[in-house]
Amino acid sequence: MRRAYKFLLRPTCRQEIVLMACLEDHRQLYNGALEHRRTAYRKAGVSVRYGDQSAELKQIRADDAGGQGRWSFSSQQATLRRLDRAFGVFFARVKAGRGRGYPRFKGRGWFDTVTWPKDGDGCRWNSQPEHPSATFVRLRGIGHVRVHQHQTVKGRVKTVSVKREGARWFVIVSCDDVPADTLRATGAAVGVDLGVAWLVTTSEGEHVANARHQEASASRLADAQRALARKERGSRRRRRVVAQVAALHAKVRRQRLDGAHKAALALVRGYDVIVHEDLRIANMTRSASGTIDTPGRNVAAKSGLNRSILDAGWGVFLTVLAYKAESAGRKLIAVNPANTSRTCAPCGHIAAENRVSQAVFTCTACGHAAHADVNAAVNILRAGLALRDAAGAA
Ligand SMILES: [Zn+2]
């Protein structure tokens, strides 16, 4: 199995300055290579390829020993390959008759990742293994940079990337042959409903990962974006709001991932079989009905941004869940979410009126009362087990 780990870097002040120079030189290399391809084609009708540009690297490095020559050759090749991929995407579009998307020059602040494609070649993960308490990554031209390693890296380290996000730096370590840690069977199955107040509600009546704080960040983000629209371009105030918006985006992403990990871990630990709504079907039905289920006026009244942030939350959760389920040897089943929120779990009566409000479900036929999300989760579980049994019988 393949897997990537992301850790916060703690560069010293000097290292941070050099990291910035490294990023800037890679950006210039990218832009220079783009200019080269563009000019060659315009002036002479010549298509320059990755191989041609890679062959020139040696000369570029020799001519600029104190600049481009400082960094890892392989990391520069990775940047040229990145440009090559951008052209690949562009040519595929042209072929498909959608001739837009010519690779763009990267402005300052729009180039934030450098990759070392092979551990040991211009970079070394865990470069000071004898150090008693800290982990370091050695990067050519930069030195041994301290890593805030909050979990163990398993498997064989393949590539190392450094990424700038706002004022922070991260290292992303991508590994091959990561062993799956299969969990012991629990003999239990669960259905999960994806919601707004809680990311996940189970058929057992448990709520996991409160999504309210995410919603609060989303509202602040919406406010900041409105403020941004009012600021004059190029003004100092605008720059300040731009930084604020970026920080809020990062916060929403962190909270989302955090909630997803928490919820997925709880489910994978407790159940062998996990049934969830098929989000692709849910997305199709949503345009007609408004949302997956009735999300309550609270959210419906809010902006499309808020909505899309919640949607992304469900998507991220299912991605994390799929990954964790695979590595733990658990079975995931996706079901069509149609009617799961309107059907009475005990008697099967289907009516929109059953759902009294966002949280309350009361069956108009048998009087069964439950938390609406729990009732939906029970229906989801039943649909999933029916699918599984049908597949087993076939
Ligand atoms: Zn009923």
Image (spheres, grey):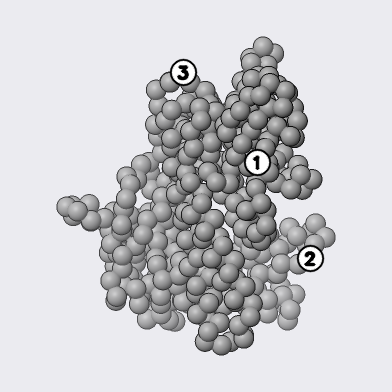
Name the residue nearer the viewer: 289 or 367.
Answer: 367
Question: Which residue is denoted by mark 1 in the rendering?
Answer: 357
Cα distance between the residues tagged 3 and 2: 54 Å
Camera-near label (3 vs 1) is: 1
Residue 289: mark: none
Q: Residues within 10 Å of mark 1 (few under 14, many from 20)?
A: some
In which quadrant of the rendered image does the C terminus lie? top right
| Residue 23 in the image: above or below residue 187 | below
Question: Which residue is denoted by mark 3 in the rendering?
Answer: 187
Name the residue nearer the viewer: 178 or 367.
Answer: 367
Residue for point 32% across, 45% down: 152
Residue for point 33% across, 47% down: 151
Camera-near label (3 vs 2) is: 3
Cα distance between the residues tagged 3 and 1: 34 Å
Residue furthest to the bottom in view is 235
Question: Which residue is denoted by mark 2 in the rendering?
Answer: 99
